[in-house]
Amino acid sequence: MTGAASIKAHIFAAALAALAMAPGICFGQTSGEQGPLKPGSVRVTTRVPEVGKWDVASNPNGSQRVYKCKLLACSDAQTVSFTFQKSPTRHPDPQALEKYAKIELPKRTRALAAALGVLSEGAQKVDTLGSGTAMLKGYPSVFNETQFSQGKASIFVHTAIIFAGAAMIRIDSRSPNRELAKKSLDEFIEAMQIVEGPPLPPGGVPRPPAATTKSL
């Protein structure tokens, strides 16, 4: 790989990282407790769909967890990341959620595309292939599919953002194989478990969500 190609590859990787962290600042609270949940709290447990197929890493505060398919274990390179944040609201308005899915997320990718155009002298392109709302794990959610292109190479990013009570859970599935990226996203969402604590008493103050990530 030439020096210029290496720089472009690093820019491409940085773009994907920026996309994963796009919604805002992580609240960064984790808990290893598996006992009863306090009122207003949320516990999220992530699991791999197939044991022995994935390597996993997390940041020090546990607010982000990244699963990478092991060499030769998947048909193509594949990474799935979870980012845990405090939800802006426990009950998203359906119209606001639709606007977020259709306007805000594509707007972020267009801004990212503009930045990439400057950094890579126009060599990279970002396209939103689909965006909308859904109910995932019983919670209001948004989904997005983005294609990052550089020359003849492409990376497909399938994203789901789930508003689960006090927590906002973002899952990004990235692969050069579009079908594999979608399949992996669906499998990790299916394996994930979300448990809410008792409801808050009238006039109670919501507690920050405790996102517990655990690989089984």
Image (tube, grey):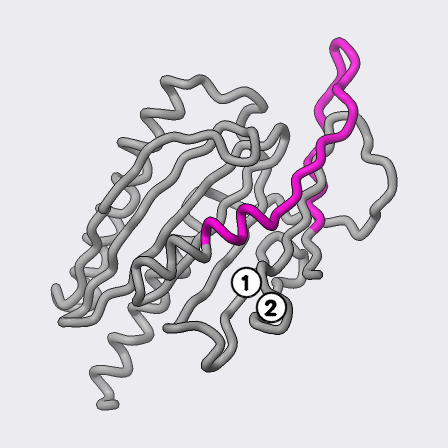
Tag 1 residue:
66
Closer to us: 186 or 198: 186
Residue 120 location, quadrant: bottom left
Closer to us: 43 or 187: 187
Mark 2 packing: few (<14 Cα in 10 Å), some, or many (20+)? Answer: some
> Residue at left 52%, top 45%?
25
In magenta, the rendered stretch is: 185-212
Residue 207: mark in rendering:
none
Taking the image as shown, residue 58 lies to the left or right of residue 124, namely right
Residue 215 location, quadrant: bottom right
Q: Earlier in the sequence, mark 1 or mark 2?
A: 2
Q: Position of residue 181 (x, y in %)?
A: 38, 58
Query: Dividing the image into 4 quarters, which one contains the C terminus?
Result: bottom right
Mark 1 packing: few (<14 Cα in 10 Å), some, or many (20+)? Answer: some
Distance from Cα at disc 1 to Cα at disc 2: 6 Å
Q: In this view, does 103 lie above or below 8?
A: above
Q: In this view, does 146 lie above or below 7?
A: above
Kindly give the residue lying farthest to the top in the view shown: 202
Q: Is residue 131 above or below residue 179?
A: above
Q: Position of residue 62 (x, y in %)?
A: 66, 56
Tag 2 residue:
56
> Residue at left 32%, top 25%?
99
> Residue at left 19%, top 53%?
114
Residue 78 location, quadrant: bottom left
SS assignment at label 1: strand
Q: Where is residue 142 in the image (x, y as percent from the top left)?
A: 41, 35
Look at the image and say whether residue 211 sits in the magenta stretch: yes
Look at the image and say whether residue 200 sits in the magenta stretch: yes
What kind of secondary structure does the magenta stretch mostly adopt? loop
Kindly give the residue lying farthest to the right in the view shown: 35
Taking the image as shown, residue 118 lies to the left or right of residue 179, namely left
